[in-house]
């Protein structure tokens, strides 16, 4: 596995970890309990500000390149690019619903639960399609110079991961602790 594919896959595992944490809060909703709204808000905020901006931009660049060379990939690439737009839009809506429920505004818990549950299903299907169908093809097709061209194309918007990267931001401290707790629980 090339370094780029390994890093890409590692980001997917990080996103899957966050979706598991979000799922735990949705399950608390379903059980009639009060979920950890701060945790939900931080997860969605991160997904809006790192994957939607950086990870998806990078993927769009790679996917467009491979589809231009192998036309059989075009339908899948069209679908994945559309899913990036839907994920961003539904993430914005979910974030707004969390803020609304916390602020006592008009949104209901049922609306929030439905939006979160839909987001989870959609996001997971997207990750599964990329992991199962796209990454193996990308690994075969991309050369070192292709990867360099992609890096150059996204360099202007490139930024470090504010949650999992070395320059982690203070605002995600609570979320990092929740991730560590979950990792420790899974290791038991
Ligand atoms: Fe994607
Ligand atoms: Fe992805």
Image (cartoon, rainbow, N blue to C red):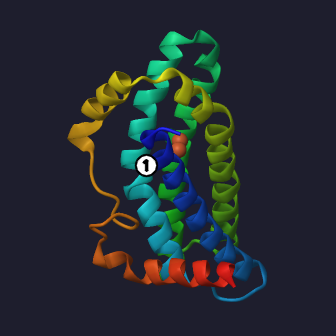
Quadrant of residue 151 in the image?
top left
Residue topped by disc 1: 52
**Residue 105 appears in the picture as rendered:** no
Left or right, residue 144 beside residue 74: left
Q: Is mark 1 within 8 Å of ligand 1?
A: no
Seen from the viewer's position, the closer of residues 133 and 5 is 5
Q: Residue at x 37, y 23 (%)?
A: 146
Rendered location of residue 157, percent (x, y): 25, 43
Rendered location of residue 60, percent (x, y): 44, 32
Quadrant of residue 168 in the image?
bottom left
Q: Residue at x 63, y 56 (%)?
A: 119
**Residue 70 appears in the picture as rendered:** yes
Left or right, residue 90 beside residue 156: right
Quadrant occupied by the C terminus: bottom right
Q: Residue at x 60, y 26 (%)?
A: 137
Q: Residue at x 63, y 25 (%)?
A: 76
Rendered location of residue 162, percent (x, y): 33, 64
Judge whether 100 appears above or below 178 on screen: above
């Amino acid at each position: 596995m090339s370094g780029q594919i390994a890093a890409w896959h590692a980001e997917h595992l990080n996103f899957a970890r966050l979706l598991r944490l979000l799922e735990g809060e949705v399950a608390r909703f379903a059980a009639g309990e009060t979920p950890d709204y701060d945790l939900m808000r931080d997860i969605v905020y991160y997904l809006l500000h790192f994957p939607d901006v950086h990870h998806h931009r990078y993927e769009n660049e790679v996917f467009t390149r491979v589809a231009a060379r192998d036309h059989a990939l075009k339908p899948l690439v069209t679908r994945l690019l559309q899913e990036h737009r839907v994920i961003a839009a539904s993430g914005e809506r979910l974030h707004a619903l969390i803020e609304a429920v916390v602020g006592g505004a008009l949104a209901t818990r049922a609306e929030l639960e439905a939006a979160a549950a839909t987001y989870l299903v959609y996001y997971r299907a997207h990750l599964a399609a990329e992991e199962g169908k796209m990454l193996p093809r990308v690994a075969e097709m991309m050369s070192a110079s292709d990867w360099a061209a992609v890096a150059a194309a996204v360099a202007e918007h490139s930024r470090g991961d504010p949650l999992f990267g070395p320059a982690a931001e203070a605002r995600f401290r609570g979320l990092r602790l929740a991730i560590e707790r979950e990792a420790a629980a899974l290791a038991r």
